Amino acid sequence: MKGRDDLLLREARERFLRYVRVDTRSDPESGAHPSSDGQWDLAGLLAEELDVLGLEGVEVDGGCYLYARLPAAGGVEAPALCLCAHLDTSPSESGEGVTPLLHEQYQGGPIHFPDDPELILNPELSPELNACIGHTIITASGRTLLGADDKAGIAEIMAALSAFRRFDELPHPELRIVFTPDEEIGQGTRGIDLERLAPVGYTVDGGDMGVIEEECFTAHEVRVLFTGRNVHPGYAKDRMINAGAAAARFAASLPEHDTPEHAEDREGFSHLTGLEGQENEARLTYILRDFDEENNRKRVALLEGLAGLFQRRYPGLIVRVDVLEQYRNMKEALALHPDVVARAERAVKAVGLQPVKKPIRGGTDGARLSFMGMPCPNLFSGAMLPHSRTEWVSETVMQKASETIVRLCGLWCSG
Ligand SMILES: [Zn+2]
């Protein structure tokens, strides 16, 4: 065991430090697929490493999806298993020139950043640090995010693969590895090849030690388009219909408590993400998020009801409401395959951690994949405070995550 622990720790750390130096920040404005060139660089680097590890069918396809296969070992007949992680980092902070810093033997208290003396990471900001006394903590230098989301997940999968290569007595089913581009901008499954997935999968893109995520938001986007009528303001009485002003009143009519600023835990919200317009035309954009689809239906009904009311209140004003389903709570799909989460819990326990089931206040590639036919909960990677310049990860937690993957693969061999 000691040999395996050391190998996983070293492999996860060394690979992680290599991957975070590649700038893979995705760009929601680019319109290209993938949305940034750096993702090709990381995919290329990983393809070489997968070749060295002896995987089969290693290929980066035209959409920057990286696929590879590891044949089953241990003489077991078991369905193939898919392991997924994403190549890109969040557009919210720079990912250019990431300089990872190792804070060895963390003793508690604040961590400072050389490139921004104002910036502080401490247990008040991230209480999970308290469980990491004595660990080596990795952060960036204060100028960029770290990119542990999701390069920790990639490094942990790669470390597990290298353990399978080194210790050939470890049983595992056929493994299908998929690294996806542009997850952070909601495009991670856009060009995925379903043929190369497996009956069951796991994303390694979660947060704290022991966390298994089997539930995420149900997500809708709603656009409300106001069409008015402009005339000279000096001669506007009973003629002008000011779409922009109507849109502002419409937005102000919605309940203030039902917004992200007032929601936590299992509460959903309606979030105004865009507001633009003038007299002739105006547009409001909302994203609706909830764990219960019924609540989003009520939010849509409220918006539609209000649209009707505004048309009666301002004769001649046209208000159109368009609703787009973005992703669904994967719990519904995972409920049909309870053993997928149950085995993840057993694997987490097997590495000496307490499984923690947490709903994701967002979405994952796994949610979409679960509805595409591959049940796919999310496993912890150890990435904490993602999308920020205080992002951090513990080396020991990365090792535990990697060992969880190894154990999980073993559990799928034992029926
Ligand atoms: Zn992620």
Image (cartoon, helix red, strand yellow):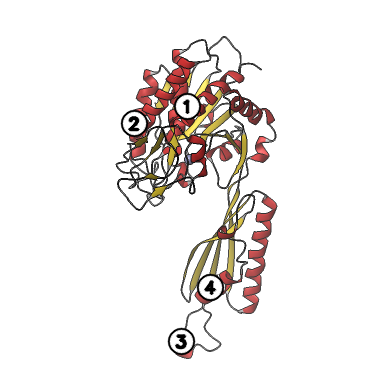
What residue is at 47 percent from the left and 45 percent from the top?
Answer: 385
The residue where tag 3 is placed is: 233
What residue is at 55 percent from the left and 31 percent from the top?
Answer: 202
- Distance, label 4 to label 1, CA atoms, is 51 Å
The three-letter amino acid code for the residue at tag 1 is Gln
Along the line of sight, the residue nearer the viewer: 199 or 118: 118
Q: Secondary structure beneath disc 4?
A: helix
Of marks 2 and 3, which one's residue comes earlier in the chain? 2
Which tag is nearer the camera, tag 2 or tag 3? 2
- Distance, label 2 to label 4, CA atoms, is 49 Å
Answer whether labels 4 and 1 touch (C-beta < 8 Å): no
Q: Secondary structure beneath disc 2?
A: helix
Q: Secondary structure beneath disc 1?
A: helix
Q: Where residue 38 sits: x, y (%)?
A: 33, 39
Tell me the crowding category of disc 3: few under 14, some 14 to 19, or many 20 or more residues within 10 angstroms, Cα based.
Answer: few
Q: Is residue 279 above or below residue 334?
A: below
Q: Which disc number belongs to residue 248?
A: 4
The three-letter amino acid code for the residue at tag 3 is Pro
The three-letter amino acid code for the residue at tag 4 is Ala
- Distance, label 3 to label 4, CA atoms, is 19 Å
